[in-house]
Image (cartoon, rainbow, N blue to C red):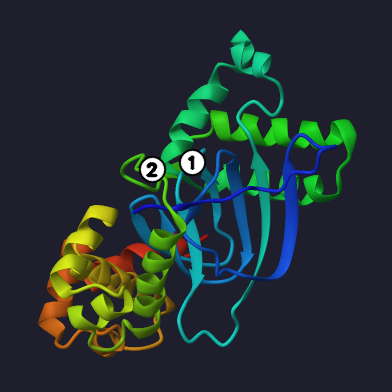
Amino acid sequence: MKPHFHKVPIPSQTSFSIRHDKDSGFGTVWHYHPELELHYLIKGKGVRFIGDNISNFSDGELILLGENLPHTWRVEAGASNTAAEVIIIHFLPNCLGGDLLLLPEAYQIPKLYDRAKRGLLISGEAKEKIIPLMHAAVNAENLERLIALLSILKILAETSDIETIASAYAFYKSNDTETLRLNKVYSYTLANYRNAITLQDVASIAHLGITSFCRYFKLMTKKTYNDFLIEIRISQACRLLIEDRIATEVICFECGFNNVSNFYRHFKKVTGMTPLEYKRKYLYKTAPELI
């Protein structure tokens, strides 16, 4: 997929950007920027696209994105509240000075930056330590501001509580026409995945014939449109399974599948688990310890 270049606004009197957005809309285009991005989602849920990964996002998620890694967050279609609350830090790799990265004591930081090129999901003790530092950094000034960022980088560089998100460093530049076309297809899919979507439908959105659209979408995303649609539907199914409010058979049709066996087959192919195994794994991870 070819993302759109985004210019991150960093005030001239500061070395990096940090902001706390309340009631923020996640309607941004598929984009990239040379700054690394530490993204703490305080409130919100939907679907995120990072590199070649499509997954749900929800309250409390903490992610580090490397330089030029394409990404976007989209609030789920039909959500009653499209607002989200986030704290985001943007910083260039050498924002604290290029010499810092050459110091023997800082050898872990370049390694962290390299790993972040695939996106890192942060959890556990590292996450618990970083969140208050991000809150403090919002209002910090001068040296306290730099110390907060260094403290965060130290935790990230030393922790094992991280999970790689994307499977490749896929990165392309794009022109505005391609960006607009792909975002129209994405928006249409996210709004209509519960219904039957034909190739004629999405080809019309992209103003292409069916054959040209299939070739174009595969070239841009390295996957077929049908594979992309299934990933979106399975992603939504995962969220509903975790919420555990409706039966699996109902989730099947709620997410756009026309029969249960077809749903089970695709779910196992995408996640490597059955819906029941997926639910049990999540509940086991989140269940409180018995004393």
Q: Which of 175 and 226 is in front in this view?
A: 175
**In what element is the residue under mark 1?**
loop
Q: The residue under label 1 is which amino acid type?
A: Asn
Pointer 2 residue: 171
Residue occupying the point 37% across, 65% down: 182
**From mark 2 to mark 1, how far is it between C-alphas?**
7 Å
Tell which circle, 2 or 1, labels the residue nearer the N-terminal end.
Answer: 1
Pointer 1 residue: 68
Residue occupying the point 58% across, 71% down: 44
Is residue 74 at least partly visible in the picture? yes
Relative to 130, is 226 above or below?
below
Quarter holding the N terminus is: bottom left
Which of the 4 image quarters holds residue 180?
A: bottom left
Residue occupying the point 63% across, 13% down: 105
260 with respect to 118 (left or right): left
Q: Mark 2 and 1 residues: CB-CB less than 8 Å, in contact? A: yes
The spot of residue 140 in percent (x, y) is 86, 43
